[in-house]
Image (tube, rainbow, N blue to C red):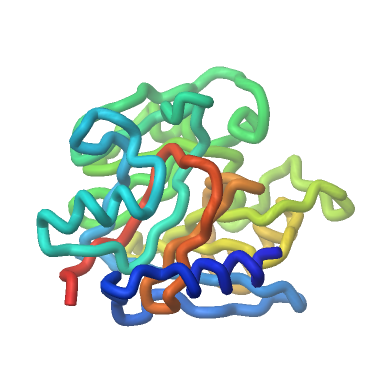
């Protein structure tokens, strides 16, 4: 199904839509295909939630439409955290320095509430994936931030509630950061995986000590370099690397 959707996206890619230098690559781990995209500190990496008309962006196309006024375009993007039916973020959302939704530290339902969960923070000098209670205690300065959950990897250890023999398998996506905070590594599975498999991918294949789950089943990727833009339901928060339009 994922391959058919990718083929459809390629066939329907607008003739005038700019592409970017490749920022994503294919990675195989234990026979499972993943797509991995990276940003470095100093790159124009942003979170997108509220469009100029006051409504949630909801799609990669709407983000690109807004960026056109700057002469810029998405190099890659993906959904970036869980959201309510009206597309409001479930947890903390900071967009361009403005807090759109508050941090949630208490218990809650679903995967978001599979504690410990965490926050992805884009700061002036790099990136952090930090457990929610540690974030609440320290309140690091974030230009953009999205709270989601569960944590996939915490200080090099998998989330304690992940099961090796789980039968819950979905297309999943998330983000991890390098220990020096200079790289943010986004990944989406191109085949359904368990939480345990996805966490091990970040820890063992990518060598990252801290990683955060964004979502599953609705997970989608926009990769301009590969002329891929996944289709699906309207999204909530979106994270994207912004580059000059060629």
Q: Is residue 60 above or below residue 104?
A: below
Residue at 69% x, 75% y: name it: 29
Q: Is residue 24 above or below residue 109?
A: below
Nearest to the observer: residue 218 or residue 167: 218
Image x and y of residue 143, in percent: 22, 43
Q: Is residue 92 above or below residue 210?
A: above
Residue at 41% x, 70% y: name it: 13
User: Along the horizontal axis of the image, is 237 left or right of 155?
Assistant: left
Image x and y of residue 237, in percent: 40, 40
The quarter of the rendered structure image containing the N terminus is bottom right
Q: Is residue 154 visible?
A: no
Which image quadrant for residue 177?
bottom left
Which image quadrant for residue 139?
top left
User: Along the horizontal axis of the image, is 196 left or right of 11?
Assistant: right
Image x and y of residue 59, in percent: 40, 47
Residue at 40% x, 41% y: name it: 58
Residue at 51% x, 60% y: name it: 230
The quarter of the rendered structure image containing the C terminus is bottom left
Image x and y of residue 31, in percent: 76, 78
Which image quadrant for residue 77?
bottom left
Q: Is residue 181 visible?
A: yes
Label tally: 0
């Amino acid at each position: 199904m994922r391959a058919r959707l990718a083929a459809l996206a390629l066939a329907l890619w607008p003739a005038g839509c700019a592409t970017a230098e490749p920022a994503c690559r294919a990675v195989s781990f234990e026979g499972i295909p993943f797509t991995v995209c990276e940003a470095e500190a100093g790159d124009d990496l942003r979170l997108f939630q509220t469009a100029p008309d006051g409504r949630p962006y909801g799609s990669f196309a709407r983000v690109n439409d807004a960026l056109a006024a700057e002469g810029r375009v998405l190099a890659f993007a993906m959904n970036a955290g869980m959201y309510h039916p009206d597309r409001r973020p479930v947890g903390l959302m900071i967009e361009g320095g403005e807090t759109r939704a508050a941090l949630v530290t208490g218990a809650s339902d679903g995967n978001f509430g599979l504690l410990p969960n965490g926050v992805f923070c884009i700061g002036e000098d790099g990136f952090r994936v930090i457990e929610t209670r540690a974030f609440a205690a320290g309140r690091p300065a974030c230009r953009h931030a999205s709270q989601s959950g569960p944590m996939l990897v915490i200080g090099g250890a998998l989330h304690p509630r992940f099961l090796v023999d789980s039968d819950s398998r979905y297309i999943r996506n998330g983000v991890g950061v390098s220990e020096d905070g200079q790289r943010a590594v986004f990944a989406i599975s191109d085949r359904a995986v368990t939480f345990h498999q996805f966490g091990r991918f970040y820890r063992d294949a990518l060598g990252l000590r801290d990683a955060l789950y964004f979502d599953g089943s609705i997970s989608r990727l926009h990769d301009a370099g590969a002329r891929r833009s996944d289709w699906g339901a309207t999204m909530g928060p979106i994270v994207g690397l912004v580059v000059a339009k060629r």
